[in-house]
Image (tube, rainbow, N blue to C red):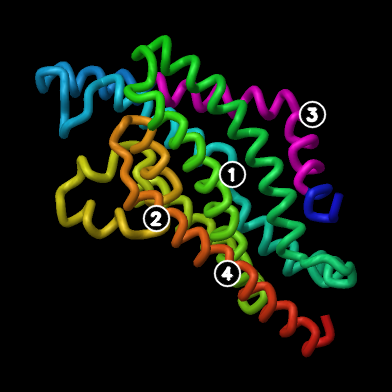
Amino acid sequence: MNAYGIAFLTGARRTLAARGDLSTQVGMMLLVILALSSVWHAATAAHGGHIGGYSFGELVWYITFAEACTVPVPARAIEDIGEEIGSGEVAVAMLRPASVVGIRMAIDGGAALARQWCCLLAGGAFAWILAGPPPSGLSAILAVGASFLSLLLSIALQHALGGIAFWLKDARSTWFLFQKLILIGGGVLIPLNLLPHAVAAFFIPLPFAAIAYVPGSFAAGHGSIALVLEQCCWLIVGMGAAFLVFARGERRLEVLGG
């Protein structure tokens, strides 16, 4: 097995070994799903059982997958990347033969995927209890695939943004902005197409929507090929940006003497 595979498994094993932290994250996600489900139950009941083309059950499955795509990736991952760059840890890692950003993303990917599967299993069971089975079995399967792509995109974007620390030496403000854009523009709390048309038209083409809105839409039975293509395109862009930023940042460190 190559270094990236080992890094991926290391991240997954560490996460699964920290059962207390994992249980807390899953428990918090279930509480959020319960709270949002209560809001959507009242909203759909007040509008004849549907709101904006979504039934209560579809909205429950939407928020379950949207949450399962955002909870697994640590909120302060960008700041952590920045601290590693500023402290010199990345300069030391550059002495190894493997790609620094490749190894980092593999470790984070393994950890995030382990968390996501726990979130999907627990969240899916909870959503089934609250609202019954998924609206569409095929869409649910596609939602699982979209959730995996969502994790990869989120990790890639965080590394691309965290790499700013090669020049600014600090990425604290960047992670705060990123999280707010995911929360609002990603459709974590509400499907983007329920927002005013102009607002939805602005946010849906952005990468933040590919992280939460796309998997949630498939889980609700509202997915489309266009959303899959959008997600794949942004994943390519995000991965390319992460490797490009780190490549240029590492060259800068070499020129400055580490």
Which numbered marker is on residue 240?
4
The mark that comes first in sequence, 1 or 2, is 1
**Image quarter of residue 61:** top left
Specify the amino acid type for callout 1: Val
Ranked by sequence position, the earlier of labels 3 and 1 is 3
Q: Which residues are magenta?
A: 8-34
Residue closer to the observer: 113 or 33: 113
Which secondary structure lies at badge 1? loop
Choose the circle earlier in sequence order: 3 or 4: 3
Specify whether 233 is left or right of 118: left
Image coordinates of residue 248 in percent, x first then y, are 67, 81
Indicate the amino acid at tag 3. Ala
Tag 1 and tag 4, C-beta contact below 8 Å:
no
Query: How many other residues sit within 10 Å of disc 4, few (<14), some (14-19) or many (≥20)?
Result: some
Nearer-N-terminus badge (3/2): 3
- Measured as percent of width and height from the top left, residue 176 is found at 49, 55
Relative horizontal placement of residue 101, taking residue 221 as reference (left or right): right
Question: Is residue 22 found inside the magenta-colored segment of the image?
Answer: yes
Residue under label 3: 17
Which residue in the protein does label 2 denote?
229
Instruction: Check disc 2 and report its element: helix, strand or loop.
Output: helix
- Labels 4, 2: front one: 2
- The residue tagged with tag 3: helix, strand or loop? helix
In the displayed structure image, the side of residue 144 where residue 45 appears, left or right: left
Q: Which residue is mark 1?
A: 73
**From mark 1 to mark 4, how far is it between C-alphas?**
19 Å
